[in-house]
Amino acid sequence: MTSSLVTSERPKWDNKVQYLLTCIGFAVGLGNVWRFPYLCQIYGGGAFLIPYLIALVFEGLPLLYLELAIGQSLRKGSIGVWHSISPLLGVASMIISLLVGLFYNTILAWVLWYFFHSFQEPLPWSVCPINENRTGYVQECVDSTPVNYFWYRQTLNITPDIEESGTLQWWLVVCLASAWSIVYICFIRGIETIGKAVYVTATFPYLVLTIFLVRALTLPGATDGLRYLFTPDWTLLMDPQVWLDAATQIFFSLSLAFGGLIAFSSYNPKKNDCERDTLVVGLINSATSLYASIPIFAILGFKATSNFNSCINSNILDLTNAFDIGETNITMENYESWLTYLNTTDPDKVSGLNLKHCELQNFLDQSASGTGLAFIVFTEAVIEMPGSQVWAVLFFIMLFSLGLSSMFGNLEGVLTPLLDLHLVPKWMPKELFTGLICVMNFLVALIFTLGSGNYWLEIFNSYVGSIPLLVIAFCEIIGVVYGCLCFRFSDDIESMTGRRPNLFWRVCWMGISPIMLLVVLVAYVVVQVQKHPTYPAWNPKYEKFPESEVKPYSSWVFAICVLLSTVPVLSIPIVAVYRLIRRQTRQQTGSSLPNPYDNQAFSTESFKTL
């Protein structure tokens, strides 16, 4: 088969916009909305941007450029690209994409559940349900909040312990099946249908964010939230954890080492400016994080102001009843002066009231990330907004669009390597094979619809998408720069872009980026091994309920955590040693084995050392 024939048979993007929107949609995900604002909140607001931007320039962009260039040059998925380093480096990327897709689509199922309930009046998470005897409200809801009750009981029906599995929640099973069906429909013909879907899924979130931005800036307390975001606390830059979280955030935010970006770029023509694509995708991804933080913090400021006002009004009511003061005498404006006066005249009586300590800063400091921000903090804020149903619908459509675009990359990171390896029987249509993969993922993901499913999802989120990705990225950059894929890499980039990589890219690839990755990897492992992992359990029988009961993982659960962190990448060094031994053996015997991953669309002679 000729090189031109192989190249022509590989699918291509209809246009450059489709490709860029797909890469941007894959990179810009849920973490941009609910992880980045949280890190800004706990790490000194604007001060966090300094380590974040440093990590973007010296770690994120060089790795992104490397993946886009390799995929475009070799026109293969992750397995085909990395075969000369270790076949299982690509397999590791594929496995991680598969595992991440399992829990990521479960989050989309939760989003669908909330979306379906957002049309109700009033919103179901705004009030407590009536108990079975119809004599009052459900006690678990009264002891916590309607928002918490709807999330933990009516959505998850969560068990008080990870070892108590519970049963499948049929409503979550239906939502999960719906989520996988939507992914399949959008993915049914590969990039042909993905390219059409991203026109909506990659752009609609920006429209919703803009609508939220305009509305949020008009809410009372919005300026307090924005001031909190942009006021830097420079002292926190002395904390190594800030730099570690900044480096990991930019790495995971760009969706590096999953294999999806390599697969997407492999559908590009050989003559394409991948360096410009790198800058466009990387900068838009980070700008989206900043852009999303503004309405998020404005709404969090509104929520903090509402809670602060409720706290003050509760104290005013207590003082009015205790001291027989006229109902309108104590107001928000003169509360502090009245409290000072009453403390002076009758301090014992005031002390006996056990008034709440109301301080706006304390409410602003109440941080949340991930599902806590999306399904608890934000839904509670939406209740207080006029036209709450409209804002709830828009918010959950936005989350679903963000997650769906990222799912395209996760699924592409699984399917493309399998197709490149010719593991799909010739008689099986690609549509059927894609459907089988989606059905298999759905069946495995049913574990997340159990009563203990949320606990397992947090384990997958914490351990699958952390150390393995850092290890793969480190092996990628070492393999390209110092391994057997480095031959004529600069010349190959020049043939694609019309110019050789400049000094900045080469310095980053050969020194700065691998060192940063190694430091982040070692620091991350050190931080993790210093503490026994725990998890917050929702237990109505806990004496401090509604606070979460912090429990340690049992030995067998902890063993699963270790396996999820190590098994996907453990094969890399083993196979690397095996291939080295085989190479030495072939040199001694003078024999050579054919390369099963040989890509006839390009010539390995076209590479040269950096």
Image (cartoon, helix red, strand yellow):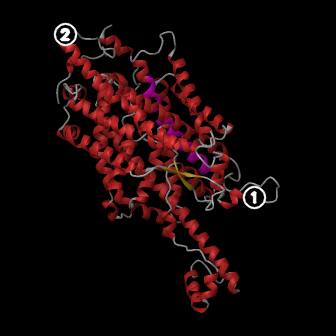
Give the residue type that dot 1 points to.
Answer: Tyr
Can you say which quadrant of the picture contains the N terminus?
A: top left
Residue 25 visible: no
Which percent across, then down, holds residue 2? Answer: 31, 8
Query: Around disc 2, counting alpha carbons within 10 Å, would you say few (fewer than 14), some (14 to 19), or many (20 or more)?
Result: few
Residue at mark 2: 590
Dominant secondary structure of the magenta stretch?
helix
Could you tell me which residue is drawn at 48 percent across and 38 percent down? 560
Q: Nearer the viewer, residue 420 or 201?
A: 420
122 w.r.t. 70: above or below: below
Which of discs 1 and 2 lies nearer the camera? The answer is: 2
Image quarter of residue 582: top left
- Residue 390 horizontal/vertical position (percent): 62, 50
The correct choice, above or below, for 232 with respect to 108 in the image is below
Q: Is residue 248 left or right of residue 66?
A: right
- Say which element carries label 2: loop
Residue 601 position, x and y percent, is 30, 16
Indicate the quadrant where residue 447 lies.
top right
* Residue drawn at point x = 28 percent, y = 31 percent: 273
Toward the viewer: 279 or 217? 279
Answer with mark 1 or mark 2, whichever residue precedes in sequence: 1
Q: Could you say where residue 24 lies in the image, as x and y percent from the top left?
A: 41, 38
Instruction: Determine whether the residue tagged by mark 1 lies in a helix, strand or loop.
Output: loop
Which residue is at the front of the view, 577 or 375? 577
Q: Which mark is residue 137?
A: 1
User: In this picture, which residue range is highlighted in magenta?
Assistant: 390-415
Give the class, few, some or many, for how many residues have Cα within 10 Å of label 1's Cα (few <14, many ≥20): some
- Mark 1 in CB contact with mark 2 (< 8 angstroms): no
